[in-house]
Amino acid sequence: MADELDTIRSLLKNNRENLLRRANVVATGIGYKATGGEKTSKLSIVCSVKEKVDADQLSEQDVVPADVAGIPTDVVQTGVIRALQAPTGRFRPAPGGVSVGHVAITAGTLGCWVTKNGQKVILSNNHVLANSNDAEIGDSILQPGPFDGGSFPQDHIANLTQFVPISFEGEPSECPFANAVIAVFNAGCRVINSNTRFKVAKVQAEDNLVDAAIATPLDPADVKDEILNIGPIQGAVAGELGMAIKKSGRTTGFTTGQIQQVDVTANVQYGAGQVARFSDQLLAGAMSQGGDSGSAVLDDNNRLTGLLFAGSDTTTIINRIENVFSALGISL
Amino acid sequence: MKAILLSIVLLTPLLALGDDLDMSSSIQEVKKQHEALLLDMPGVVSVGIGLDPNGNQAIIVGLDGSHPKTEEKIPSILEGFPVVIQIIGPVKAQ
C-alpha cells in the first residue's frame, strides 16, 4: 500500500504538468477512485475539473486519459478554485462583511449596501464610519479600514453621508433652565472671588436606538450588493425572541446565534470612558468581537433584521433594523 | 341614530372604567417601569425581556461582574414576572 502510494506519487509528479495543461483541469492529486458515486478501494489519480464535459466534445489533447501507466484516473468536478479572501482584505467591488472604517478609526465591518435617495450607500455604525460623532460629513471612508492597512487615497471607497449622533452620559447639558441656574451660581462665585465654577452635565442622556451611519461610494462600480459568505439580502424582518440569526463580520467572519432577549436597555462603553445607553435592542449570545461592529444581522431566510454594534464576553447587542431604517431614511 | 349615539355616550365611561380596573401590566410595561432603578444599581449593565430556565417570559438583568450586594437587592419576581440575573461582563462597542 505504502509502496503503491509512492509509485503513484512519482508517477503523478512526472505527469501532472501534462494533465494540468488539459482544458478544465484545475488540480491533480491522489485519491480513492469513485465509480458510480461509490468510493472504491482502488487508488487513482484524481483530476479536478472546472466542469465535466463529454470526451467527444473535447479535442483529443484535452481529454483526461482513462489511466496513466496503468493507474486509473478519476475526473471530479470541483468548479473554479479560488483563494479564500480574508474579510480584512481589499475588495473591489466590495460586499458586506468586509473591513471598513473612517480614516481616524481602526476598523469595523461594512454591514451591507442600502438605498438612500435612489442610490446605493454603505451601512455601518456611527463609531465605524463617523468616529463616534467626531467626524464631518464628507470625511473619507477606507476599505479596508486603517488597522487592516487601508490608506488614503488608494483605499478611499466612500464619503461619510449621514450619521445618527450618539448621546453619551455626562455630556455638557443644553438644558436652558439648568444653565441659567448655574450662571447665577457662577456669578455668585465670582462675587466672592471663589475659583470654583459649576458646570451642568447630563446625569442621564436620552436613550439611543441606533449606532448607525451611511457613506456614499465614489464609484458605483465598487458596489457588490451582497454579503460575503451569505449572499444577497432577501428583504427585512423584525427580530423576535428565539429567532436564529447570522452575520458576516471583519473579525470573526461568518457566525450564527439566537435572539435571547428583546426590549433590551443597555449601558454600552465606548473608548475614553464614554458610556451611552441604548434601548429597544436585540441581544444574542456571543457571536462577535471587536471589529465586527457594523455587521448586518440576518435570519435563516437571509432577511435583514439588525445592525450589530456592541457585545460582552457572552452577549452581542444589535440595533433593530427598522429603527436604523427610520433614523437614516434608508431602505434596502 | 339617536340610540346609537346615546349608547356610545353611556358606554364610553364604562369602557374607561374597565381600563382602570385592569390592574395587570404587560411584562414590557413592568420592565419599563423598573429598568431605570435597576440600571442605577452598581454593576447592572442591561435589562431586557427573555426566557427563564422554565421557558417563561422573564425580565433579564445583566451584570458586568459579580456584585453580591446588587444581586441581593434585585427581587426574584417583579409584579408577577420572574427576574433572572445573568453575569454578562462589560458591554463594549465593538
Image (cartoon, helix red, strand yellow):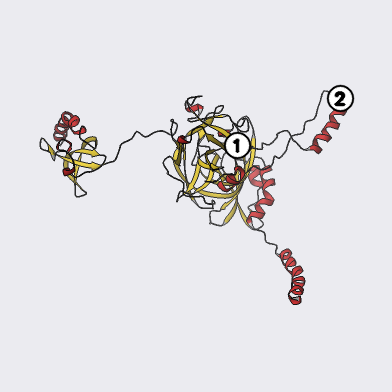
Residue receiving disc 1:
A162
Residue at 50% from the left image edge and 36% from the top image edge: A109
- Determine which quarter of the picture holds residue A271: top right
Label 2 chain ID: A
Identify the element where label 1 is drawn. strand
- Return the residue found at the far bottom: B3
Q: Amino acid at mark 1?
A: Gln
State which tag comes first along the sequence, 2 or 1.
1
In depth, the one of A311 and A44 nearer the eye is A44
To the question of a shared chain for discs 2 and 1, the answer is yes
Q: Pointer 1: residues within 10 angstroms few (<14), some, or many (20+)?
A: some
Identify the element where label 2 is drawn. helix
Q: Pointer 2: residues within 10 angstroms few (<14), some, or many (20+)?
A: few
On the image, the x and y values in percent for residue A178 come to: 80, 37
**From mark 2 to mark 1, how far is it between C-alphas?**
42 Å
Residue receiving disc 2:
A190
Q: Is residue A267 left or right of residue A84?
A: right
Q: Is residue A320 above or below residue A185?
A: below
In depth, the one of A305 and B81 nearer the eye is A305
On the image, the x and y values in percent for residue A323 come to: 60, 46
Q: Nearer the viewer, mark 2 or mark 1?
A: 1
Q: Are marks 2 and 1 in contact (CB under 8 Å)?
A: no
In depth, the one of A53 and B81 nearer the eye is A53
Q: Amino acid at mark 2?
A: Arg
Residue at 22% from the left image edge and 35% from the top image edge: A28
- Return the residue found at the far left: A70
In depth, the one of B13 and A241 nearer the eye is B13
